[in-house]
Amino acid sequence: MRKRLISLVLAVLMLVTLLPTAAFARSSPEELEVSVRYCSGHGENDHDYEASFLYSDGYFNKSGYTFRQDLCNASFALALAAFSSKEADSLGDEDKNFKSLMQQCGFTDADSNEWFGKAPVNDSIGVCAANKPLRDNGVDYTLIAVGVRGNFYRLEWGGNVHIGDSGEHEGFALCREQTLTYIKEYIAKYEITGPIKIWIAGYSRAAAAANMAVGALDNGYDLGNVSLSPHDIYCYCFETPKGIMKEDAVGAVYNNIHNIVNPNDLVTYLAFDCWNFARYGVDHVLPTRGDYIYDHLKPAMVAEFDKIPNNGGKYSIDDFHYIAFDLSKLGRDDAIKDMGSSVTQKEYYKMLEKAMTHDFAFSREDYVESLQSSLVEILGLIFNRTELDLGLALEIFTAKIQGNYRQLLKNIANPVGMAKLLETMMFESLNEADITRFSAADVRQTARILAERLINMILKDPDVVATLLANINSIISAHFTETELAWLRVLPDDYLANQQPAMDIKGVFRDVTGKEWYSDAVAYVWTGGIMNGTSATEFSPNRKMTRAMFLTVLYRMSGSPEAKGTLAFGDVSADYWARDAIAWGVSKGIVCGYNDGTFRPVSQINRQEMVTMLYRFYGSPAVSGDLKLFSDAAAVSAFAKDAIIWAVDNGIVGGYNDGTFCPRNTASRSEMAVIIQRFCEM
């Protein structure tokens, strides 16, 4: 192989996974404080750290499309716990922190895939899972927690730069498949059936795997003998790289995927937009310099950051400064000029992206042909050394680059001199990190290759390269999870939530434009697979609901369980389209037939009948009060009184502007959609 290695700098640029830590103080009577142990991703350490988080089953009582700050914080704990442990006695014990967290949160059957039991390979990924029963809106669910390994994964580092010459990121796609395969195997192993909810989280590389795995679930990936609505997927991805093609990322159905993104983190820009990469879901962007809230909250955030152990030193993101490099003045002191904060870090990354994809790797094909195999090899070689702290070596190396960038730039006309300087810094960094077992020839070859590519890039993009070399250490610090954690601690609960777009049905049905009072509800029930259109292009919002239609909706919400037994209704044949839903509803006491032996499936359902069926579906809880607020309360049938009191008290239904309830008014499909959305989100 012509090139066995590529530089540590490019390794950093192409994907660096660093550290985390935590301790949240917010609490409520329903929340449980849990202790999370996790391994750090940088600095000098040979042990795990400990942090406190909050957890509650109540985090999963609304749609996964609704961003929740409390669930986001708990998901960060899940992502940390899924890291391998530096205190493990063996490979098979490296999921110990995940198991501890799950036990504290009341989950059972904590388990992990094969890569937590044997040495990783380039494109493997560790995945953990556990489960617990959960009841929500009258339905018994199994909540499955899935943690994807996002740090201390050694040889798997090589897969981060396994992009491939076309289509989605090949390395991340392999991670997605392994994640989905394990979830399916876990469900089968522990004989989980019926409705499920999935809670999944990951950091950095693991965030890409989780992001793409949930994208596949939203697209209908089959997990076996379970039912899963997109509303019941709770996916939080932290510092998520891009792994899919832009054209595949379009669709509101993916908005149950929440990406928590630091705009100063270079990892979130990889793989590059110029190569048509994207990620699924909604980006919830942390504040950065120039945002309205940044200056107001920064002091509190930095105070939190300083409390976190092993945080990488002082908060340095705002130390970023733009450097102008005038090639015509090469060799003179005024060739390099510090332009201060004239360009933000976020703006600079767009410039860097263009330079990297045109003048460092000339195309995606050039990257694969000339650089990919070397990157995969060097990352796997270095990070497979479990006893060494390579994060420290990277930090030392990048600090040396940042401290000596002027010397590097002066050597633009001397490739040998630039390669020699890089070589010296590489040797010094490895030795200072107490890493002595490496090939000196490989390091020299790496320095030579890097010098060749850097010189070409400097000639084309002198300011970009100068700025990179002068700021590389602070650029890397933006990927430290302490920074993200500190922001999560101090942000108002609605800051990231307000970045969640409303569900949009526009363009799906010809008869729902997105402006109607019921549009959000139609989007909700359609996205979740609760209600379908009456055709491929129409929802028929004004069509009246029948008994069979409404019961089918409840049946789907319950996971469409197997309906046993025979039906004695003369108007429901064995092959009737709603036969299973009717059989299930009768067996559960949700509905019954008429005295003449019929079920009347096509009879239109009225408001009091609909509310009564929903009340029974929920479990017929005890109620108190009356219906005196409605002028026509006397028109409510005795069988429906408690149901209507319950529905009104919970905001599921209301009366009309004239003070009536109109219990015998028939219900339309649009009204049904609104009522179901309110019920599911109460």
Image: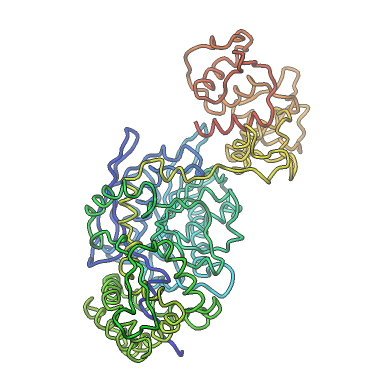
Q: Quadrant of residue 475?
A: bottom left
Image location of residue 552, percent across then percent down: 66, 34
Q: Quadrant of residue 29?
A: top left
Q: Is residue 45 toward the left or the right of residue 659 in the image?
A: left
Q: Residue at x 69, y 19 (%)?
A: 665
Image location of residue 513, percent across then percent down: 68, 40
Q: Residue at x 44, y 70 (%)?
A: 352
Observer able to see residue 476: no
Q: Nearer the viewer, residue 541 or 376?
A: 541
When the figure is inspected, residue 145 is found, relative to residue 170, above or below; the finding is: above
Image location of residue 566, percent across then percent down: 70, 33
Q: Nearer the viewer, residue 138 or 376?
A: 376
Q: Is residue 268 toward the left or the right of residue 577 in the image?
A: left
The number of discs equals: 0
Give the color scheme: rainbow, by chain, secondary structure or one colour: rainbow
Q: Is residue 239 toward the left or the right of residue 273 in the image?
A: left
Q: Nearer the viewer, residue 533 or 559?
A: 533
Observer able to see residue 402: yes
Q: Quadrant of residue 520?
A: top right
Q: Is residue 600 toward the left or the right of residue 362 in the image?
A: right
Image location of residue 194, percent across then percent down: 55, 43
